[in-house]
């Protein structure tokens, strides 16, 4: 399974469309980035593709009106996430405004989910 790496430009674009909120944590994931709220990922970057976790209604709206793509490795896309249209990457501010709006919807949806419980510490050997 090939793991696409995000370019510095793609990482900068991702950070620019993620809401500026103290609740948001952006951290590296396998050479890419993930944006989290309450321990749950609401948006991620895989190569140049931004993926979002949306409510069922929002996901259906996005997937029925835009040319979305699978999010994650082609052999095993991430369930529950929708990749924003690749054509938005080349549209500059217009594409970034649409990406920001969908990432914001994902943030709002995931912020309403129960916080992810921290993993238990592994016992020392």
Image: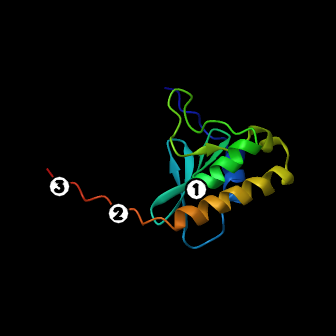
* First in residue order: circle 1 vs circle 2: 1
Tell me the mark number nearer the camera, choosing from 3 and 1: 1
Helix, strand or loop under label 1: loop
Q: Given contact means CB atoms under 8 Å apart, are the residues at marks 1 and 2 in contact?
A: no
Colouring of the image: rainbow
* First in residue order: circle 3 vs circle 1: 1
x and y percent of residue 84 in the render? Answer: 69, 44
Tell me the mark number nearer the camera, choosing from 3 and 2: 2
Left or right: where 8 falls relative to 77: right
Q: Given contact means CB atoms under 8 Å apart, are the residues at marks 3 and 1 in contact?
A: no
Res 117 label: 2
x and y percent of residue 101 in the render? Answer: 73, 59
Q: Disc 3 versus disc 2: distance between alpha carbons?
A: 18 Å
In the rendered view, would you say 46 is above or below 113?
A: above
What residue is disc 1 on?
55
Q: What residue occupies the far bottom of the structure in this picture?
A: 22
Helix, strand or loop under label 3: loop
Name the residue at 81% across, 50% down: 95
Name the residue at 70% across, 48% down: 62
In front: 92, or 107? 107
Q: Disc 1 versus disc 2: distance between alpha carbons?
A: 21 Å
What residue is disc 3 on?
123
Helix, strand or loop under label 2: loop
Neighbour tally class for label 1: few under 14, some 14-19, many 20 plus, Cα within 10 Å: some
x and y percent of residue 35 in the render? Answer: 56, 57
Q: Disc 3 versus disc 1: distance between alpha carbons?
A: 37 Å
Tell me the mark number nearer the camera, choosing from 1 and 2: 1
x and y percent of residue 29 in the render? Answer: 50, 47
Rendered image quadrant of residue 55: bottom right
């Amino acid at each position: 399974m090939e793991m696409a790496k995000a370019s510095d430009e793609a990482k900068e674009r991702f950070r620019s469309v993620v809401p500026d909120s103290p609740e948001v944590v952006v951290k590296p994931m396998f050479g890419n980035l993930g944006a989290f709220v309450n321990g749950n990922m609401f948006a991620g970057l895989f190569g140049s593709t931004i993926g979002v976790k949306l409510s069922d209604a929002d996901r259906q709206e996005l997937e029925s009106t835009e040319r979305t793509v699978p999010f994650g490795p082609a052999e095993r896309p991430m369930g529950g996430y929708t990749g924003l249209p690749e054509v938005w990457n080349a549209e500059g501010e217009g594409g970034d405004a649409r990406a920001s709006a969908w990432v914001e919807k994902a943030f709002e949806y995931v912020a309403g989910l129960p916080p992810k419980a921290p993993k238990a510490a592994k016992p020392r050997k």
